Amino acid sequence: MKQLYAFVKKEFYHVFRDRRTLLILFGLPIVQIILFGFALSSEVKNIGVAIQDNARDVHSEQLTNRIKTSSYFQVQAAVINYKDIEDRFKEGSIKCAIIFPANFAADLYRTGGAQIQIIADASDPNTATIVTNYLTAIIGNYQQELNPNAKLSYQIVPQLRQLFNEKQNGSLNFIPGVIALIFMIVSTALTSVAVVREKELGTMEILLVSPFKPIMVLIAKAIPYLVLSLINFIIILLLSVFLLHIEIKGSLLLIFAESILFIITCLSLGLLISNVTDSQQTAMLISMMGMMLPTLLLTGFMFPLENMPWIFRVISHIIPSRYYYAIVKAVMLKGLGFSFVWKETLVLAAMSVVLLTIALKRFKIRLS
């Protein structure tokens, strides 16, 4: 144990004297949590809208005012003709245009059915659909207020309730995925250069002739990054709670335990990459680029897995961050217990054992 303590102490020295390592370890997670929490959001707000009001009556003005007061839209300067609307779409200053016909009020009272043309920029289909739904809801509410006594032979009145995110905080969708992304990149990338660095510096010979067993070398390499990753996790939780106003509904103890397990999985993967590569650049490239894209695309926090072809859904099962994302989302955001995440926990534990075993088998005790 004295040998292990001395080796772990040496690894801490390696980490703290390398400013680039400290920047990746603590600077990158903070930047990512702030960017994903504030800059990236699935919510649609401040959409540029142009209104061509050919009616200029009380109803068109009231609808225009309602759209202006909505937080979802930013009404631009009024337009006069279709050519002006087309130019603004091409410029990208608006995502939607609303055109009131000249006889809007007359049709509303005489025929009982006035028309409003809504033109949306469908180069982003999801945004176009959301914007048109927002406008349709505003118009529908206004119509209901105009004629509240209208009765149908029957009515279906939906009652909406938002589960797990009553305030509709857009950051809730990204924080669990960002935590998984940070651990996968930081823990795997930094550990992946641990053994390779010894090879490049020529100090591997000293380790190999020492009485230290190979498994103890790997454990000593991983312990500092495990401790520092847990400190990183505490910082991320504090930023999520106090900066992004995320409410942690589940057990903190369970979240910490699952995070430790996932960090061990990432460290095991990093040690495996470190053992099969011969340069720090190669190890860093494989760990960062090779892990970042699958974590972004195949965990479900950026794009729903259900919408993907079956082959990608199958591949996603070998991505460790998929299971950790599901665990954090269930415990932190939904307040569920271990009985709901035990399957994902077993998968992560099995991955840790397999990856660490392979890394130990591939650890070369002789230099070529």
Image (cartoon, rainbow, N blue to C red):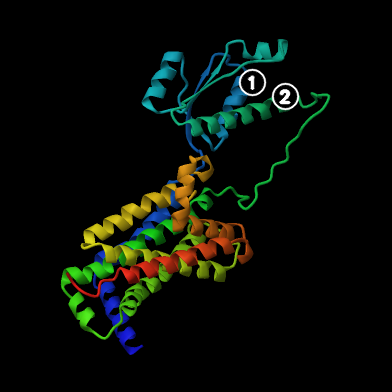
Say above or below: 323 vs 39.
below
Extreme residue toward the bottom, this view: 2
Q: Secondary structure at mark 2?
A: helix
Q: Secondary structure at mark 1?
A: helix
Q: Which residue is mark 1?
A: 59
Q: Is residue 110 visible?
A: yes
Q: Which residue is mark 2?
A: 146
x and y percent of residue 218 in the render?
33, 74
Quadrant of the rendered image containing residue 30: bottom left
Quadrant of the rendered image containing residue 104: top right
Q: Amino acid at mark 2?
A: Leu
Q: Residue 33 or 70: which is nearer the viewer?
A: 33
Say above or below: 68 vs 366.
above
x and y percent of residue 199 in the render?
19, 70
Q: Residue 117 or 308: which is nearer the viewer?
A: 308
- Left or right, 149 with respect to 83, comes to right
Residue at 69%, 24% in the rendered image: 143
Residue at 26%, 77% in the rendered image: 13
**Label 2 vs 1, first from the N-terminus:** 1
Q: Amino acid at mark 1?
A: His
The alpha-carbon separation of the residues under discs 2 and 1 comes to: 10 Å
What number is the disc on residue 183? none
Extreme residue toward the right, this view: 153
- Left or right, 8 with respect to 141, comes to left
x and y percent of residue 5 in the render?
33, 85
Picture quarter with the C terminus: bottom left
Callout 2 crowding tier (Cα within 10 Å): few <14, some 14–19, many ≥20: few
Q: Residue 134 or 195: which is nearer the viewer?
A: 195
Q: Are marks 2 and 1 in contact (CB under 8 Å)?
A: yes
